[in-house]
Image (spheres, rainbow, N blue to C red):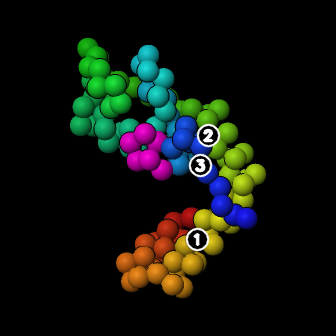
Amino acid sequence: DNHFEVPEYFKCPLSLEIMEDPVTLCTGSGHSFERSWLQKALDRNPFQDPITNIRYEHKLTFGPNRSLKAAIEDWKQKTNYHSALIDSHVQRLRFGTAIAKEEAADALWNL
């Protein structure tokens, strides 16, 4: 059975997708985000935590969350995540709507 539940803390709170490059915001909140999503949020509001909405007097910075990245990679290996993901996209290519097929092809291309 390739069905599995992605742990919530593996998902970026902004994109709601599993993180590939998790970073931690250097505030007291301790939240982790997908790097690209946090960068977009800080480009819009460089002084504001995108989750707590707390404004700071300085521009916010972030750094890599290596332990979370390792945990996600370990989980992916143990759950055959990539195999299940590929199977899901192939099913969409075979049986999906035109839009679903296009999205699946793009997703497979980007793996």
- Which residue type carries mark 3? Val
Q: Few, some or many C-alpha atoms within 10 Å of disc 3 (few <14, some 14-19, many ≥20)?
A: some
Q: Few, some or many C-alpha atoms within 10 Å of disc 2 (few <14, some 14-19, many ≥20)?
A: some
Which residue position is annotated with label 2? 69
Residue beneath the point at 51% across and 84% down: 95
Q: Secondary structure at mark 2?
A: helix
Looking at the rendered structure, the number of numbered marks drawn on it comes to 3
Q: Secondary structure at mark 3?
A: loop
Q: Is residue 105 above or below residue 32?
A: below
Q: Are marks 1 and 3 in contact (CB under 8 Å)?
A: no
Q: Is residue 43 left or right of residue 83?
A: left
Q: CA distance from mark 2 to mark 1?
A: 23 Å
- Indicate which label's residue lies in the foreground, 2 or 1: 1
Which residue position is annotated with label 1? 88
Examine the structure image and report whether residue 5 is included in the region drawn in magenta. no
Q: Which residues are magenta?
A: 12-17
Q: Is residue 21 visible?
A: no
- Which residue type carries mark 1? Ser
Residue 84, given in percent of the width and then of the height, sits at 65, 65
Residue beneath the point at 49% across and 68% down: 107
Examine the structure image and report whether residue 14 is included in the region drawn in magenta. yes
Q: Are marks 2 and 1 in contact (CB under 8 Å)?
A: no
Which residue position is annotated with label 3? 6
